[in-house]
Image: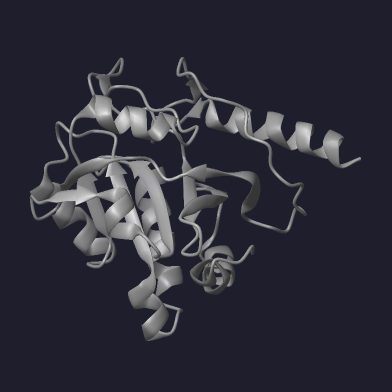
Amino acid sequence: MRTQKTLIASALLTAAALTLSACGGSDQDSKADTNPVSVESQPERKAGTVLDRPFTKPDLVLTDTRGESFDLRAKTKGKPTLLYFGYTNCPDVCPLTMGNLAQAKKQLPKADQEQLQVILVTTDPERDTPASLGSWLKAQDPAFTGLTGDFATIQAGARQLGIAIDPPKKNAKGKVESMHGKQVIAFSPKTDKGYVLYNGDTTTIDQYAADLPKLIEGEAP
């Protein structure tokens, strides 16, 4: 029954949203409040999960790598957009995710590459200044957008998407870590809603490359 499949998928997605990655550390449960989200059941071969109830794009106004104000809703309105929360000092998940997206984007026709918006919102704004964020992203893809700002604002925006992030803190070895969810959310250019969710550390270049043409058109992959 569809209702049963929806409830099962909803539980799985909620559990995923409550899992944080320390980018090299162990996963732990988040204390952030997130609401269950129902999704359509997907075949195992599908990388993305199509949301039955798409997310509203968060009302976020942050600072881009040029030091200018960036209104997420206004700047990405009507554009295919991939949104990820992470940080530049992350040793594994974040560079893997952004690198995979960059390589997948290169496989698109030039016109499609210019349409696609890939945005990284830092979860470590104290260290990720506009300059450092811009330098890091330039090595991934100069066209990627990096956003930084007040941590509380960033955390609230992430929570609107069921993505949990905790304030950066030192681990037992004295190294600063940022605990954050690993989801990449695709927003449709037709509705500006977040309708497909990917797991950043398990989705491959080929899987993104297969889905991007449809995401650019606002279609379900």
Q: Can you see residue 92? A: no
Q: Can you see residue 58? A: yes
Total label count? Answer: 0
Give me the residue at 35% from left, 51% from top: 95
Give me the residue at 38% from left, 27% from top: 165
| In-image side of 208 versus 134 (left or right) | right
Which residue is most to the right? 1
Res 169 quadrant in image: top left
Against 57, residue 139 (above or below) is below
Q: Position of residue 12 (x, y in %)?
A: 68, 33
Looking at the figure, which quarter contains the N terminus?
A: top right
Q: Position of residue 42 (x, y in %)?
A: 75, 51
Foreground pick, 109 / 175: 109
Looking at the figure, which quarter contains the C terminus?
A: bottom right
Against 69, residue 118 (above or below) is below
Q: Position of residue 127 (x, y in %)?
A: 14, 35
Against 123, residue 113 (above or below) is below
Q: How is the image coloured?
A: one colour
Q: Position of residue 194 (x, y in %)?
A: 51, 49
Give me the residue at 52% from left, 24% from top: 34
Res 218 quadrant in image: bottom right
| In-image side of 103 versus 145 (left or right) | right
Against 173, residue 148 (above or below) is below
| In-image side of 53 versus 200 (left or right) | right
Give me the residue at 50% from left, 60% from top: 188
